[in-house]
Image: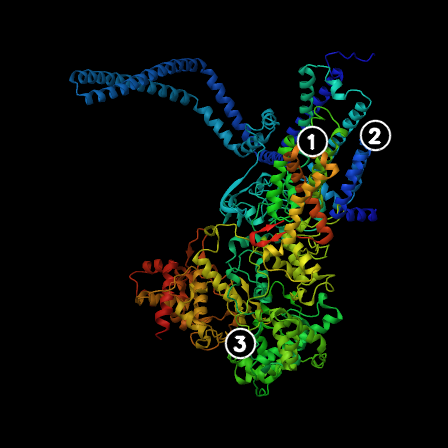
Amino acid sequence: MEAIKSFINTISYPQFSFTLSVVLFVAALKTKKLWTRTGGWIMLVLVTLFFAVGSLDENFRSVVAKPDNVPIVMMIYLAGFFWWLSMYKAIKNDEATESGAPTFEKSESEDKVFTWPDLVFSELICMVVLTAGLVVWSILLKAPLEEPANLSVAPNPSKAPWYFLGLQEMLVYFDPWMAGVVLPGLIVVGLMAIPYIDTNPKGNGYYTFKERKTEIVLFLFGYLVLWVQMIVIGTFLRGPNWNLFGPFEFWDINKVVPLVNVDLSEIIWIKMLGVGLPSHWLLRESFGILLLIGYFIVLPVAMAKMKYFKRFYDQMGSARYYTGVLLFLTMMLLPIKMFARWMFNLKYIVHIQEFFLNI
Amino acid sequence: MAAPKKTPDRHYNFRGMNAVFAWSSIALLVTTLWMVWDDYAKPWKRFQAEFRERERQQLAAEAETEKAKLNQNEVARIQQDVANEEVTLEGKRGEFDELEATLIKIGKNLYAADARSRTTKSLLDTERFQYDSALQSGDEERIAKRRAEVERLAAKHTEQRNELEAITELKKSLEAEIKNKRSGLADAEKRLAGLRLGYDSLQERVAKLDKKIDYFLLNAPLMDFVLPALKIDQVILSGLYNDINFTDVDRVDRCMTCHLAATRMGFEGEEWKQPFRSHPRPKLFLSASSPHPYTEFGCTTCHGGLDRATDFARAGHSPIDDEQKRGWIEKWGWEKQKYLDTPILPAKYSEAGCIGCHAGNVWISGSELLDIGRQLIDKMGCYACHKIGYEAYEDLPRPGPSLRKVASKISPGFAYKWISAPREFRPTTWMPHFFFQPNTSSEENLKRQEAEIRAIVAYVWSQSATGEYAPAPTGDAERGQDLFDNVGCAGCHIRDAEAKRDDFFPQINRLHGPNLIRAGSKVSSGWLYAWIKDPKQYNPDTRMPSLRLTDQEAADITAYLMSSREPAYENLSIPEVDKTVRDELILSYLENNFTIESSHAKLDKMDEGERNRYLGEETIQKYGCWGCHDLEGFENAKPIGVELTEEGSKPIHQFDFGHVHDVPHTRRDWIKTKLMEPRIWDQGKEEVKSYKELYRMPNFGMSEREAEAVVANVLGFTKAYVLKSRRADQNPETAAIAAGRKLITSYNCQGCHLIEDQGHAIKSVIQDVGQLPPNLASQGARVQAEWLFGYLHDPSSVTMRPWLDVRMPTFGFKDAQVNTVVSYFQTRDKTDAFLSTPTVADPRHRAVGRVTFGMLQCAKCHPAGPQAGTAGVTAAELAPSLLLAPGRLRHDWVPEWIKDPQSFVRGTNMPANFAKMKDGSYQSPLAQALEAPMFASQKAEMMRYFDSEEELTTFLSDPDQVVVALRDHIWWNLSSN
């Protein structure tokens, strides 16, 4: 048991868990059996079993059962359930379409029912059940109040509200200006821009996976693998001093991890070229700047010429294509930077402290 | 049963849906009820209901006792009277009926008349206003009309009022008539009620606590917002606040919601357990007449805890040990309040709560643990390394001896052995062990410490002045012992090889100075002789006073002290220093400031002596030796310890518990453990931490109770949560008293004297009560400020009690210090500083004084001259010569003292000649005594000053006159003789 715990602790570190989750994400989308009722039940049982057995461990229990964190456990179930539900319906529809039958939504929309009682009654039931659930919750779990706020004593760890934990996790890898302003801004803008970029009419009013594979994979990657996973990491795995702790690891306030991150300029000028850092920022950061230019300007153009992406370019036209690709590349900057951190201890790609510009 | 048919216009199966709806509705109902119950069933309601019931039972039992005490015959007799009267009245029924009918009729008339009169009055008021308006308009016609109307209404109102008053009178007379006719019955009933008063009032209280239908209705869930019997009780405390970091909030204490008997008396018995016990010491706490009424001070101000909480756990109750914790978890659902910075102090440490308001009061009267703890902090010198920002700990002298001339006192070898382990040489010493502690026990660290000690000695010797002392003259050790015990040394010193420090708890005055064992192994006789003769020649700042010993006395005491030796200790060898280890240590200090290379270069340049001195200086820096010892080169160094001013408010997560898991995570346990085992948090870390990072707080060898006494104080060093204006130490009187007490503690006056009922430590050596130094109760009221000032500067100037062996030493006080003492005594005894010179008394007073002085045999104990006493009088009965009185005593005090000595000094041998009566007056026995034939000549002598015998008797019967006459005799007759 201890061995399993320590194994889980080890693979919980983001360099493993993140890689693993990317692999699992791809594998899951390719495994059709997962998106059946049986598959869903098995997943439900496995996840529940993990929490149940895990709760036997004191450290695990103290984190998971904390009144602040209980909603995040529920969120894991909810996110999983809705992912499963959409995939389940999408795959059924895809199969139906393949055999020439209408989609479920299509056949269902032939029938008409009255708002009352079908809709209103079921809504009423939901309301009643939800109210009862909230009452029970509020009785059983006390409000997680702490001591009066104190300027001179910051709680350790200091955690943002759960919905900001993804942003807080990004701060590990990016400058506050990027992680706190630019990237969240682009997330909002990007979400608003989706309807204007993705004009593909397929999938309107019905679930489908086959007809919108790229769109769905892209969205789910950003939502599940990046956003939800970072909230989960921030909630359950970030302990004192924002150090990472496995789910079965004691939150030792004295834990020390080495901080030896270096900038891209240092890697290139000192490590590879063996000369000192140039004093002028433009020269010093030229490699990083070139890299970013290549990433954001050359790469989209090059991609448009590649076979796989060319059809999007053709379909969407250049304005939509470039906007979409820039947003996509910005999103991908996060996992790229994460991997670069784990592999090369990369601190910043461009580090111009002269203008507080750090990327 | 066939499956229900799915109707075409329904998407769902509605029988199923209805079932779901029904069940979910039931679930909602149940959860709603649960919610109501959860909100209603607060634990404090249970306590209130239980207490109410128990109080009712107790009252009912008391009522029964009261009933049993009633004289049943008396009750029966009066009841018979009542019955008789009732029969009599019944006979006159017709008469009464008629009267009452009339009364009803009059009542109706009265009502009507009253209504008429009121109506007219309001019309009149309106008309007056109209008249006023008319006057403003100047319209003559209107004015005349209005005036007429006002006059008419006024007349009408007067008439109606007359009518009303007539009816009222009539009614009153009728009522009086009825009452008069019933007076027999009323009287009997009154007598009955008087007899049953005690029982009835108890019954009434029981009835109030009876649970009737309204009790259940008013306390039912959802109904209890109207007027519940069970409700939260609270006091709002202005000026006593909660510091919630961004603002201060007045405290609102709700403890009495459950601790229902705390503010009341009568619940002290064994059967009353918490939370239903009365608060102890009601004269001091909580009661309205005490200095701390709960309506002004509340509970959490002193006890800590969350003021507004009404739940056992959330209030912050803290168990004292595991057993209590388990009991509480089981019984009250206790759980640790992680986020509560100020949990309730356990009963053992509850005195810590006093410090919030009394930090500046040096002795907190009535405390048990605090004061001994404060003395320990003082003696052990905690304040020397840890700043404690309270008046009591500021500007105190350094607790250890000066090292400026240490080279002339002891040998470097002795210093090495002493620093290594002071308690090895002198088990009672306050000097702690810095070296060879559990966290510095590896072989490498042992060597480092040897090098450090050697270096400290080298540094101190390099700075110290040297000097040679001629050997002491030969003395007689036996005589020396006698002197040591009786002349006053024993007030501060013991000489007992077996003594353990803890045995003196809580009377630690006797350990004020060192235990003088093994002096022969420590110092030279020459040094000791010179030191006890005049300590200030060695150290001008020493607190050790001079006892004005003669050369021979000093030689005798020296001989006595030097006779105690420990050859084994003298022969202990000192280990050789491992130079590699020492040099590594030096490098580690050098490398803090220089590069590794230049550090090595610097080291290479140093010779042996320089190396030792350099390491010595760094080591003294490291351990903060200058905190306790005056040391050249460290005069202005800052103390090295953590400041303790707000230690009691330090968040628990800032305490380092290291890898120690069996110490509960509370402030008090951390502090106590730290005091007893200062290096414990390094357990298992000696190998991991670098040598310089290891904890260095020294080990004082504290016993558990010593540690707890100190903890009680430190827990009280909290952030201020009491407005300054509400603190007890903020007025000039308390400040003057505090300053005096501080000095008195510092110079250990209580080693010899009894001050504020504490002290007389020397009593354990001086068995004869008559030889004890005096009790200084009422000293401020007793002696003149100028005299006291002079005496404290030079006690040899006057010999008040020539029969005493023990001497008041010469302390060499500065003027400011003497002023502090004088104003302490005067403020304490509520006396003004200066006094006018009394006028010369008239001959009559002086004559009466002379005669009564003789009659009362005052001279028997108060020798009139400098001789050592009178035959047949023991030392205990002797009193100072009265010749000194006019120059020494306050003339306003003397008569009061003669009248009632016990009220000034409890247990004094001065006889009380004037019996105190119950009403507080005094009676003089003299007038009566004078009738005895033996006093005939005295009578005759006095009669010369009186016109009649009656006048003399009146004079002598008045104690106030007699005591003044006695004073006048002492003042004007004795001194002029």
Indicate the quadrant containing the N terminus of chain B: top left, top right, bottom left or bottom right: top right
According to the picture, the residue beneath numbered tag 3 turns out to be B805
* Residue B595: quadrant of the picture: bottom right
Viewer-side label of 2, 3: 2
Which x, y percent locates residue A42?
A: 82, 33
Mark 1: which secondary structure? helix
Q: Is residue B859 visible?
A: yes
Q: Do the residues bearing badges 2 and 3 touch, measured as CB atoms within 8 Å?
A: no
Give the residue at mark 1: A315
**C-alpha separation, residue under disc 1 versus residue under disc 2:** 38 Å
- Which of B785 and B888 lies nearest the eye of the viewer? B785
- Seen in the image, is B837 located left or right of residue A231? left
**Which residue is at the front of the view, B512 or A169?**
A169
Mark 2 is on which residue type?
Thr
Q: Say which of B517 and B342 sits in front.
A: B342
In the rendered structure, which disc, 1 or 2, sits on the residue that comes first in sequence? 2
Marks 2 and 3, how far apart at CA:
104 Å
Which residue, given by chain and number where applicable, does mark 2 sit on? Answer: A38
**Image mark 3: chain:** B
Q: Secondary structure at mark 2?
A: helix
Single out the residue that lies furthest toward the left.
B140
